[in-house]
Amino acid sequence: QGADVYGEVANVGSDVSPSRVGESVLVRTMQENPDISEKNSCWTLGSECNGGFAQYIAVRSSEAFVINSDWSATELASIPCAYSTAEGLLHRSHVEKETVLITGASGGVGSAAIQLAKLRDATVIAQCAREKSEEVLQIGADKIVFRDSDLLAEMGSDAVDVVIDLVGGSNWTQLLDIIKPGGRYATSGAIAGPIVELDLRTLYLKDLTLYGCTFQPKEVFINLIKYIEDNKIKPLVAKSYPLKEIKQAQLDFLSKKFTGKLVLVPPDENV
């Protein structure tokens, strides 16, 4: 596992220029499948190949992107998976200067989506647990709705242009109810439950578009590199751990009592 990787190139293969040794690189999480040329076929770091829960990792040169930034190694390591997922959701659903609801807003992807939506001049309504609302407002959300809220009662129908959903679950139908006619829904997660009930009449009578977002074109990651180098986004590292404390890091991850990202640091790494 380990879908987030930042590091320095220690060595290269025979077909890669030795000049790459020493480069600071971010590794793309959702990579192009080297065995299948079909457009939406993915090769995921930490799934189809070994990930970053290690001191060293071997990756294809084409998926290691040079990064020039004064951020720390820990901060850079917090970016690839969550921020590329968030950028992919916003890119795919064509978010611009409009009103967006983001569910699961205190998590890694949700907090990234807040920042990236604000870069697009969107008005962001963030859904999160009550105890995390102040932190989420500090990230950049314009308004908070609580995780246990009745969205339709609180916001009314046709309240937002886009929903960026990472949650799913039993209250899913409300997400379509609050989208304006002609609006969009995009999802890349279902942490509250993957099985939902869809009233097809809501879908077709409101002319909605639903996006499932896994595959990411390369431009999504290139966008992130530029945002970092231009200091347009901020890393949100809740805590870092030495690699030998991976068990505790995983337990803390499961607790969901943090905002942002947890980062593992390999031995002898200056951060």
Image (tube, rainbow, N blue to C red):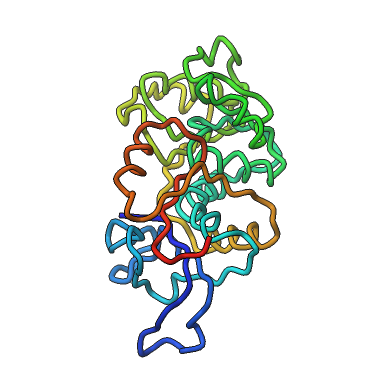
Q: Residue 124: x percent and y percent? A: 64, 32
Q: Residue at x 35, y 66 (%)?
A: 55
Q: Residue furthest front?
A: 268
Q: Nearer the viewer, residue 158 or 13?
A: 13
- Residue 83: tell me if it is visible: yes
Query: As drawn, is 218 to the left or to the right of 234?
Result: left
Relative to 59, say whether 148 is above or below.
Answer: above
Relative to 185, say whether 11 is above or below.
Answer: below
Q: Nearer the viewer, residue 90 or 129?
A: 129
Relative to 177, say whether 27 is above or below.
Answer: below
Q: Residue at x 52, y 33 (%)?
A: 106
Q: Residue 72: x percent and y percent? A: 58, 59
Q: Residue furthest top?
A: 153
Q: Residue 155: x percent and y percent? A: 60, 16
Q: Residue at x 39, y 38 (%)?
A: 189
Residue 231 found in image quarter: bottom right
Q: Which quarter of the figure is the N terminus placed in?
A: bottom left
Q: Nearer the viewer, residue 53 or 47?
A: 53
Query: As drawn, is 241 to the left or to the right of 106?
Result: left
Relative to 100, say whether 36 is above or below.
Answer: below
- Residue 41: tell me if it is visible: no
